[in-house]
Amino acid sequence: MTQEIVIPLPGNDALATSIARHLNVVRGSLQTRSFPDEETYLRFEDELNGRTVVLVCSLNRPDAKFLPLVFAADAARDLGAAKVVLVAPYLCYMRQDRRFHSGEAVTSVSFARRVSSSFDGLVTVDPHLHRYRTLDEIYSIPSRVVHSAPAIAEWLLNNQKSAILIGPDIESEQWVSDVAGQARSPYRVLRKERFGDRNVKIELPDLTEFRNETPVLIDDIVSSGRTMIETARQLRQQGFGAPVCIAVHGLFTADTERELLEVAARVVTTNTVPHHTNGIDLSQAITEQVAALCWL
C-alpha cells in the first residue's frame, strides 16, 4: 500500500484537513494563482512520487474549478503519483441525465468521461441519481458514495427530536424515509411540479395530525430554494410554526439563504459545500470511503 497525501483545491482546506487527520496522513499544499490573462498556475509543494494523491474539491459552481482540477490531476501523475483520487463531496453535472429536447448535450455523460480520464477513483456524497441507478453507469473508474442519512438522523436526534420530516417529492421518499427511520420520526412527502428554475407548484398533504411537531424540510440540493420557501409558506397556512430546513448540498444563490430565513426558523447543511450553515459533519464518513478506495 502506498502512503496517501490529501491535498485541497482552493476553498476545501477544512474538509481536507479533517480527512487527513482521520486517515493519519499528511495534508499537502497546492499553490495556485492566475496569470494576468486568467490562465491558472499550479505548483505542488510536496513530494508526490509513489504516493496516492487525494485531491479534495467540492464541485459547486464547477466551470471555474474544473480545469485547474484536471491540471492538478495531470501534474500529480506527471510527478510520479501512484494513484490520483478525487474527493468531490458535491458532484456536479448530474442534472442533465438525458436529452429532453433535440440537440441538447447530455452533460452528465460528458462530464463523467472527463473525470474518468483524469482520475483513478472518485468519492462523493449523495449524487443526484435520478435516471441512473449507480455512478457506474456513466463513470468508468471505481467510485464510492457516502450516504448522509445517518449523520442527518443523528443531528435530528440531538437537536430536533419532536419533528415531522417532509421530503420535496415522491422521488425523495426512499431517502427521507431512511432518515426518518433512523431519527425515529414520522415523515411525509410533497407532490411537486416544476415549471422552471424558480417556478414550482407544491401540493402539501394534510398534516393536521402532526400539528404539535416541528416541521423539518429535507432536500438533497438547495439552490434557488423555491421548493422549501413555498413549502414553508403553505405550512404556515396550515397553522405550523416556522420549519427547520436541512440540505445535504447547499448551493445557495445570492438571495436563497435570506429568503429562506424569512420563512424558516433555521437552515442547516452538511459540509459537502463550504458555507456558514454547515452544521452536519460528514468528514468521518467520507474518510472511510476514501480509505476503502485507496486500498483497492
Image: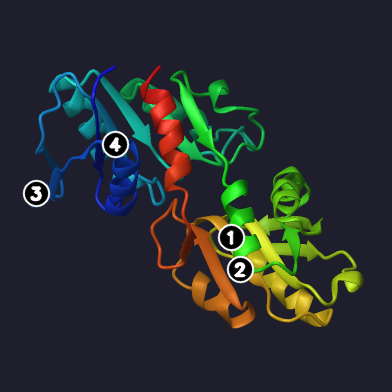
Q: CA distance from mark 3 to mark 4?
A: 23 Å
Q: Nearer the viewer, mark 3 or mark 2?
A: 2
**Type of amino acid under label 4:** Leu
Q: CA distance from mark 4 to mark 2?
A: 33 Å
Element type at marker 2?
A: helix
Q: Nearer the viewer, mark 1 or mark 3?
A: 1
Read off the residue under disc 4.
Answer: 55
Q: Position of residue 21 (x, y in %)?
A: 30, 44
Read off the residue under disc 1.
Answer: 155
Q: Nearer the viewer, mark 4 or mark 2?
A: 2
Q: Earlier in the sequence, mark 4 or mark 1?
A: 4
Residue 64 visible to an observer of this rendering: no
| 4 displayed left or right of 29 | right
- Please give the name of the residue rendered at 57% of the width and 74% of the height, measured from the top-left corner: 266
Read off the residue under disc 3.
Answer: 35
On screen, residue 137 above or below 111: above
Q: CA distance from mark 3 to mark 2?
A: 47 Å
Quarter location, residue 142: top left
- Please give the name of the residue rendered at 78% of the width and 75% of the height, measured from the top-left corner: 234
Q: Nearer the viewer, residue 162 or 260?
A: 162
Q: Nearer the viewer, residue 206 or 94?
A: 206
On screen, residue 230 above or below 193: below
Check whether the beta carbons of the residues at disc 3 and disc 2 lie within 8 A of each other.
Answer: no
Read off the residue under disc 2.
Answer: 159
Q: Nearer the viewer, mark 4 or mark 1?
A: 1
Q: Earlier in the sequence, mark 3 or mark 2?
A: 3
Q: Earlier in the sequence, mark 3 or mark 4?
A: 3
Q: Position of residue 250 (x, y in %)?
A: 50, 58
Q: Earlier in the sequence, mark 1 or mark 3?
A: 3
Q: CA distance from mark 2 to mark 1?
A: 6 Å
Check whether the beta carbons of the residues at disc 1 and disc 3 lie within 8 A of each other.
Answer: no
Badge 4 crowding class, 10 Å Cα cut-off, few under 14, some 14 to 19, many 20 or more, is many
